[in-house]
Amino acid sequence: MDEISFLRRVRTDIPDRSPEAVTAGRAALFQVINDADRRPTASQRPQVSLGGRWVTVSAVAGVAAVVGVVAVSVVGVGGGEGADPAAASVLEDAASATLRFDDPVVGEGQYLLVESDGVSVGAGYLSQEVTAYFLGGVHSELYVPADMQEDWIWVQCAAVPVETFGDESEQLADIMTGDDVDMFRRAPGGELYEDANIIGNVDYATLPRDPDALLERIYELTTALEGGPAGKSRDGAALTFIADTLRVGTVPADLRAALYRAAARIPGVTITADQATLNGTTGIAIGRLEAEGNLQQDIILDSDTGQFIGERQIAIDGDDILPPGTTTASTAVTTRIVDAAPDDSSTCNSE
């Protein structure tokens, strides 16, 4: 898979890009984002093209122990150790709650609206001497019809700076987001970029609902991606696959429950924060540290309702640009039923 580095050498003499180049770069980045193997290590961060699409809330993350959770031991695939008992309990509670609540029924002429909000780190060099970074944000809307073979609508609002850190940071933010534009796409069956479905070409119906069998299938899928999970262990790639799949927002309840239970069988999965907030919604962060890659992958959920709130990645030790504990990528997800879908990107102007 093509991977681009977050750390880009940016200069003020960058030439203007054509609209075609902007569109091509955006499409390429979106494909990277939606690949189950998209997440980079510290040494292989995806490159942020100028005007690239931001999909993710950055914050300094704390790590806390959750109190009052009944521990449940879960055995991993093959009889080995699974997740930490406290994390396994939270995931089991979330899975059980998910199955108690019916998914909303999308009626004829209606759409499931999946809204994604977040921010991501942009970093680079304005000169040989000046290193800068900023937080950039995006809002996107995915309209999924009742008949999923009909046209899906995807609105991506132009990236905007969320937070800057001084003059150099502001200049970098202006360069990277200054010429970004709102995007509107329509395609049957969710094939919103060439030869690929927005859900990653994974057929939900073919994924097992038994958690052990599902985790084995996830291991197979992630290992098959360009020869294996680049920069990740097998278990780290599996948790990233689960986070990516849930993030799309179209996973049915029975599969969401199975994904939670599969995560409980992954060694090294723990509670990383008992209070984690994305876009104003707070839940419990369940994650795994990929020590060699200096990366912590979290999924954030409400164990009482089974709601998937979002996902994030944290650079634990930081580096020469990012402070330790920086959330380098995350996405907050909400879903609801709506009676109509837009015909253009004008919904971006109503934010």
Image: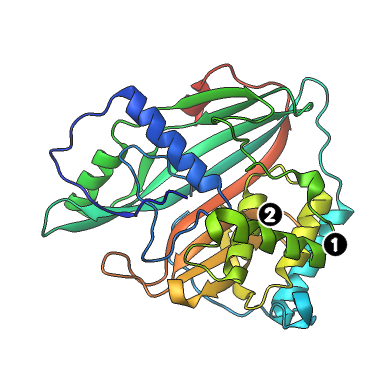
Q: Is residue 48 left or right of residue 226?
A: left
Q: Is residue 332 left or right of residue 103?
A: left
Percent across and percent down for residue 221 are 66, 56
- Relative depth, front residue between 313 and 309: 313
**Up/down of 141 relative to 229, above or below:** above
Q: Residue at x 81, y 39 (%)?
A: 104
Residue at mark 1: 210
Q: Residue at x 66, y 77 (%)?
A: 267
The amino acid type found where label 1 is placed reads Asp
Q: Is residue 200 left or right of residue 42?
A: right
- Using the image, tell me which numbered label, if any, was put on residue 308: 2
- Relative depth, front residue between 269 and 227: 227
In space, the residues marked 2 and 1 are separated at their CA atoms by 19 Å
First-in-chain label (2 vs 1): 1
**Up/down of 321 relative to 183, above or below:** below
How many marks do you count on the picture?
2
Which numbered mark, 2 or 1, is in the foreground of this view?
1
Q: Residue at x 47, y 26 (%)?
A: 183
| SS assignment at label 2 | strand
Percent across and percent down for residue 116 are 57, 42
Percent across and percent down for residue 278 are 55, 55
- Relative depth, front residue between 199 and 67: 199
**Up/down of 341 relative to 52, above or below:** above
Label 1: how many residues lie within 10 Å, few (<14), some (14-19) or many (20+)?
A: some
* Contact? badges 2 and 1 (CB < 8 Å): no
Residue 336: which quarter of the image? Answer: top right
The amino acid type found where label 2 is placed reads Phe
